[in-house]
Image: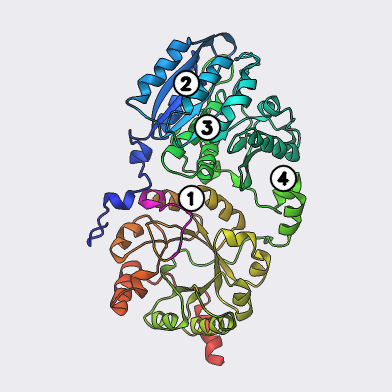
Amino acid sequence: MSSASGAVSPADLSPVTDSRPLGSDLKMRVWTIAGSDSGGGAGIQADLHTLHDLGVHGCSVISAITAQNSVAVKMVDPVLMQTFTAQFDALGVDLPPAAIKIGLLPTRLHVEVLARRLATIEAPFVVYDPVAIASTGTPMAEPNMLAAVREQLLPRLSLITPNGPELEALTGIPATSPALVRAGAARLRELGARAVLVKGGHLEWSGDLCLDYYQDETREFWLAAPRLDTRHGHGTGCCYASAIAAVVAQDYPVEDAITLARAYLQQGLAAAQGVGAGPGPIAHLGWPTSLAHFPRAVLAGSTLDRRFGLFSVEGMEASCARLPDGPFAPTEHNLGLYPVVDSVKWLRRLLGQGVKTIQLRIKNLPAAEVAPAIRDAVALGRRHGARLFINDYWQRAIEAGAWGVHLGQEDMETADLAAIQGAGLRLGISTHGYFELMRARELAPSYIALGHIFPTNTKAMPSRPQGLVRLHRYRALMAEWPTVAIGGISEDRVTAVKASGVGSIALVSAITGSSDWQGATERLLAAVGAGDEPHSASAIREVEHAL
């Protein structure tokens, strides 16, 4: 817990890693099982560069020794089985992994031995980059290796990351259209893979964009990034999979790891330089911090979806009418103290205390009483010149003329966002990590909520607590938008949360659960502030006075 003075304790940085100093905690170990690249651009060398760059400790199991440079692969020498297995034995007794990245497996026997080993290793996440042919076109593995992958390795994988040609080699399905990419991914899952990420670098139909496609048992998504005009990029597949493993090892969900790994690749490709006569490796520049390098999360029914037909026709048609045609109405960057309350009674109390930003999150109210409660809340908000956001009930908020609406990620799939925008309401969106931040960005909302920062009992959460270090990262990344920190923030944690630079701090039980709610509100207003004066506050008061 935090101290009363606002000092940060280890508990506030856990259970998510605080990534000191951007992620280096040697307890987070990732094994890379791959070939050695004597040119240093791919394979084990690229993997270890990436793992170290993203703050985890890399351990290696070498499957083959290659003689190569930036121009050609001269030789591939598979290591003896005795050498291959001895590396597993040595690591297993002392350096167990948080994640495993697999690259080149030169023979069927290497695949079979690895599959048996994976059955005995307690690794929560295993990602496989199914490299069989070098970027120069030279075969790196025996022809029957991929058959062994299909038969024995796929069921052991958390994620497989083929490019277009590799997807076709594994499934027989050419990746020549979005529908075929989706079908190829589904085929790999039928063969046993739990999840598939088809990398977009070799998908020629996507033109100037690199479109990555993810599919697992319950969901699918596309990420879009500019296709960079560079001859460099040796080892991109190795680095992509290694970056995913490094981020997952730091307790991020796989969708966040993929999003961050694509950003890592984009920033590395943008700065890549040659080191020999041929294509050079990507640059290893650390944890991505520039929004320009992050991919777009493609929303169903969006312009990108309609351009390429990325999702199913049914899903696209159902979604087209919901999306806004521009940004939502802006709000002040500094929203200040932001209580979340469940009744008009609490709303009246806190507005009377000088709160200027507040959310009504109605729970357990009979349906017939919801609309009157929202109308009363909106009238109170206008009377006090406050920014009142209605949680979830966007139709009632539009009818009552509320200041704004707050929606969760799941609500983005069902709410009529175009109607909310057309009514002039502000929109706040909840996010719980990098992937959801990129989804929220697509809507150009009025503000973005970052949560949940600490463990909370106020509602069931599908995600892990984010912690302070992630909060700092998210806020800096999304500096263009007003940001709100939310989730488990007690009064004694406010100082540490405010230090992240967020313009607002949302609180629930810290006020409504306090035995001295007036005193708590006064102290919190003094610590956080009431936010900038609403742009239309004077107009609201004039209208209210006229009424």
Q: State yes or no: discs 4 and 1 in contact (Cβ < 8 Å).
A: no
Decide: few, some or many residues near mark 3? Use Cα within 10 Å; few <14, some 14-19, many ≥20: many
Residue 305 — which label?
none
Q: CA distance from mark 2 to mark 1?
A: 29 Å
* Coordinates of residue 301 in the picture (x, y in percent): 71, 54
* Cα–Cα gap, marks 2 and 4: 34 Å
- Considering depth in this image, is 261 or 371 the residue closer to the camera? 371
Contact flag, marks 3 and 2 (Cβ < 8 Å): no
SS of the residue under disc 4: loop
Up the image or down, 283 lies above or below 40; here it is below
* Viewer-nearest residue: 429 or 278: 429
Residue under circle 2?
A: 44
Look at 64% across and 36% down and name the residue there.
Answer: 189
SS at circle 1: loop
Report the amino acid beneath label 3: Val
**Is the C terminus in the top left, top right, bottom left or bottom right quadrant?**
bottom right
For label 3, the residue is: 127
Instruction: Say which of marks 1 and 3 sits in front.
Output: 3
Mark 2, Cα crowd under 10 Å, few <14 / some 14-19 / many 20+, is: many
Whether 238 is drawn above or below 365: the answer is above
Residue 310 - label = 4
Q: Where does the magenta region start and end? A: 459-470
| Residue 70 belongs to magenta span | no
Residue 433 circle label: 1
**Main SS category, magenta section:** loop
Q: Secondary structure at mark 2?
A: helix
